Amino acid sequence: MASLDDPITHGYFRSLVGEKGMMVLQKMPEGEVTDDEVSRATGVLLNVVRRTLFILYEKRLASYRRVRDTDSGWLTYLWKLDLSPLAELMEEERERLAANLKERLRFEEENIFYTCKNRCARYVFEVAAETSFICPNCGEELMYQDNEELVEVVRKRIEKLRPTK
Ligand SMILES: [Zn+2]
C-alpha cells in the first residue's frame, strides 16, 4: 500500500483534502468510527472531518454504513477508511504529473526565451520580437535567457516519476 510519506501520495492528498484533512487521514482511528469520534481522535473540527470523509468517499477511499439507533431513532454514520484503491489512484496521478512535465519540457525545448534585467516575466522569441525586445512591463531591454538548467530540472523530475518496478 502506498505510504502517505511518499511525495506523490502526500501531494495528491494535500491538494484533495488540505492540511487539516491530512490530519484526519493520518490520525483516523482504525475500524468503523463516527465523524464525531474522528473529530475527537484527530482534534480536527467536525465540519472539516465531514468534508474530508465525503471527499474521500467520492474517491472510493472511505465508505460508510448507516445504523439506526433503536432508542432515539437517529441515523448514525459509521465511517471506515479503505485505502485499497490508492495504488491505482496514485498510478493515474503519476501519469498525470508526468504528462504535464513532458508538456512543459517540450515547451522549454521548442522555444527560445527572453527576459529583462528585472526579470518581470519570460517571453518566448515571437513575443519578444513583437515588442522589439523591450520589456512591456519596465521598458528595459530583453535579453536571451538560457533555459538549459531548467530543462535539466524538468527532465530529472520526469525521470523520478518513472515507475520503479
Ligand atoms: Zn521588465
Image (cartoon, rainbow, N blue to C red):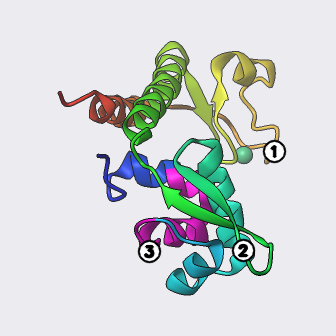
> Which dot, 2 or 1, sits closer to the camera?
2
Give how far across and how far down residue 35 sits, in percent: 64, 72
Give how far across and how far down residue 58 sits, in percent: 65, 43
Residue 118 visible in the shown view: no
Q: Is mark 1 within 8 Å of ligand 1?
A: yes
Give the residue displayed 61% in from the left and 56% down from the top.
65
Q: Distance between the Cα atoms at labels 2 and 3?
A: 30 Å
In the picture, the disc for residue 27 is: 3
Residue placed furthest toward the left:
165
Q: Which amino acid is tagged 3? A: Lys
Q: Which residue is tagged 1?
A: 137
Could you say which is closer to the camera, residue 77 or residue 9?
77
Give the residue displayed 75% in from the left and 80% down from the top.
71
Query: Where 80 falls versus 131 (above or below)?
Result: below
Q: Which residues are magenta?
A: 13-31
6 with respect to 138 (left or right): left
Q: Distance between the Cα atoms at labels 2 and 1?
A: 70 Å
Of the two numbered discs 2 and 1 on the same chain, state the one appearing first in sequence: 2
Q: Residues within 10 Å of mark 1 (few under 14, many from 20)?
A: few
Query: Where 138 falls versus 71 (above or below)?
Result: above
| SS state under label 2 | loop
> Which dot, 3 or 1, sits closer to the camera?
3
Q: Which amino acid is tagged 2? A: Thr
Give how far across and how far down residue 62 sits, in percent: 54, 52
| SS state under label 3 | helix
Could you say which is closer to the camera, residue 136 or residue 41?
41
| SS state under label 1 | loop
Of the two numbered discs 3 and 1 on the same chain, state the one appearing first in sequence: 3
Q: Which residue is tagged 2?
A: 70
Give how far across and how far down residue 148 sits, in percent: 37, 29
Q: Is mark 3 within 8 Å of ligand 1?
A: no
